[in-house]
Image (spheres, grey):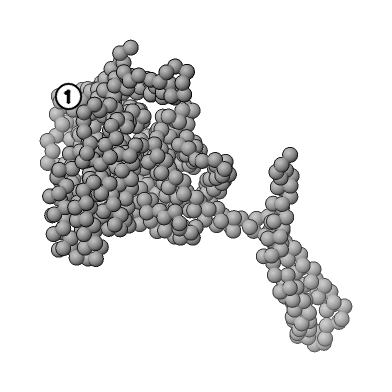
Amino acid sequence: MNGISPTSKMANSILQRVHGAAKKERWGLSIVKIAWTAGPVTYLALQGGYLLAYREAAPTRLVIYFAGYTVFAGLFALLIRFFYNATWGSENEEERLSLERIFSRLPDRIIEIRNLQLVSLDLYGRRVLGAKYILENPDAGAESVATALMDLTGDSRVAATMRDVEVYRKHGLPARAEDKSNEVKAMLHEYTSKLGEASQEVNRLVWQRASGLAPSKRQGRPRTRGFLGRVFTAGESDNLDLMSLADAEELCVLAYELICNRRFSYVKVAYHGDKEYRDAARRLAKCRREYRSAVFVRNSRLRVLAEQLYSAGPSPGHISSRTHSNFEGIRRIIASQPQIRSARLLQQLVVDAMASYLEKPTGAAGSKRGSTEMKKTNRILELYKQLQKAALRTDRAYENLKKAWKHSADVMRSRVDTTPIRLLRAGDSGRGIRIRLNTIGLETRKIMTIARLIESKLEEFGLEHEERGVKSHDQKELAVDLLQILDRFIPLSEPGVQRAIESSNSAYMTGIDPSMTSAAKQTWGLALVSEVDSSKQTGIHETIRSLVQYDRLEILEADINYLVKNFAADPDYLRGLMALEGVSLNQELDIPPPPPVPTLKS
């Protein structure tokens, strides 16, 4: 049988550790130290002490005794240090090497995943998604940005003018950059509509670059909403079709950030007052969380199905040459969108694309093409059923939210005390709402434990795919494995934690150079993650707005000062909320019902 037996591997590991421990100890120097201490040092110290105490030289037997004692004590200490290095002493070195390997291998996985996403698309899709990766890279050069614009528009004038904008911007000449910016904006108007249909995010990045602005490393990159839930579902359902490669990429980026000790802030809300008010408020908050989670799951199913229904259609090449005639399937590059802006619109596109797809003839029965098409059809039908189930759960959650909203209004109307709900600060009592800022992340002492687990998983992944190509499902499996490791140390399955992470911006990992050395990747990655602003402002703004809209919180001027000082809130944003008309107790729930998912025609 080929290969090394487990016993041999264990023996080699032990020998390596013993050899390493022996190398760490400088035996010659250690023996000289013992001899010096046992000889001249012991003799002089003993004779001096004995002479002071007894006014005579110490007897030879006593000198020999103390010399022998010193030799044996020194050898025993040396032996203890040797065994320590052979067992635990090498752990620090191993931990350092584990971190280095993670900083080298995780970026490689991210590069592979991005390329696999491009491989799964047609030429048109590759141009759009590839341009997105370039345009969102803060370190992209003028030539790179011009190449992205050439791919998107096929217009050499647009590409050349955009190159000029970048050149002048990078050389600190904003006046000339603005001149060129005005030129390129005028040229881009004819492409904006089609570009927006393909990807609103790419459209935003194009216009940002055209305005002479590059993405900010400090601000970071928007995450793909719902990726944690989709990876959890894929792992729990043993169905990797329920997640996308974009989700696998986001998970690898998150793992990298957590190893770099990044922490995420989120706001916890507590209701105070009499029992009837507390129960009604908590019930409303619970139903809102459940509805929000149900919408997230439905949108996740919608996103994955839309990616599966992406249709090559007529190969359009550049955006400028794309036509709408004889068009089947979805032409939006879903992987380029951090979040779904309009679930209703995307759902209608999905329903229409499903009808179109099911009308298409498949290959001949028994043929390779026919078998492949049948598998794809079955997969898409299963995803559509999952979408229908998610939509039904969303409907039930919406009805529960309506009931909780009505019950909360009834409780408030029945009260004798009709004073508005206020924000409670330290030392305040009575009816009101108290908020507290929490942070989540890896504890420093646990980073090395999780680093070794991740490093082991990455090493296993590398060995498994050393001789065969890496496929989409392989990267998805790795993402599920990494999530299971992270979830052991951080409660990533909790909806509140998921929202806190997904609403934050991630580090821009688009500047990875595959040719970087391990040391360069480590320095680059640590600097990149530490540069991202972990602002708590977004979270506090969302929380206060929600409390005003649903819990009828009244903001006072004193509250603004408190929120600015303790939560870094924007005072202008808070004053804007103060200007909003209070929610009437007779007002209906101001959320439209979720769109139903129709049954497919057989």
Q: Write the residue at 81% across / 75% down.
A: 67
Residue 307 showing in the rendered view: yes
Horizontal side of residue 178 vs 566, given as left or right: left
What residue is shown with label 1? Answer: 588
Name the one closer to the observer, 471 or 537.
471
Name the one closer to the observer, 6 or 274.
6
Where's residue 250, x and y in %? 39, 42
Q: Please, is residue 318 above or below residue 566 in the view?
A: above
Q: Please, is residue 376 above or below residue 57 in the view?
A: above
Could you say which quadrant of the image residue 600 lies in? top left
What's the residue type where badge 1 is placed?
Answer: Glu
Name the quarter where the C terminus is drawn: top left
Q: Please, is residue 545 above or below residue 352 in the view?
A: below
Name the one closer to the observer, 420 or 27.
27
Residue 221 showing in the rendered view: no
Could you say which quadrant of the image residue 87 lies in? bottom right
Badge 1 density bin: few <14, some 14–19, many ≥20, Cα 10 Å? few
User: Does dot 1 land on a helix, a strand or a loop?
Assistant: loop
Where's residue 277, x and y in %? 26, 29
Where's residue 283, x and y in %? 31, 27
Name the one closer to the observer, 577 or 157.
157
Residue farthest toward the right in the current orientation of the protein = 61
Q: Write the residue at 13% across / 59% down.
A: 179
Where's residue 244, x and y in %? 40, 35
Name the quarter where the N terminus is drawn: top right
Residue farthest toward the bottom in the current orientation of the protein = 55
Q: Write the residue at 38% across / 20% down.
A: 362
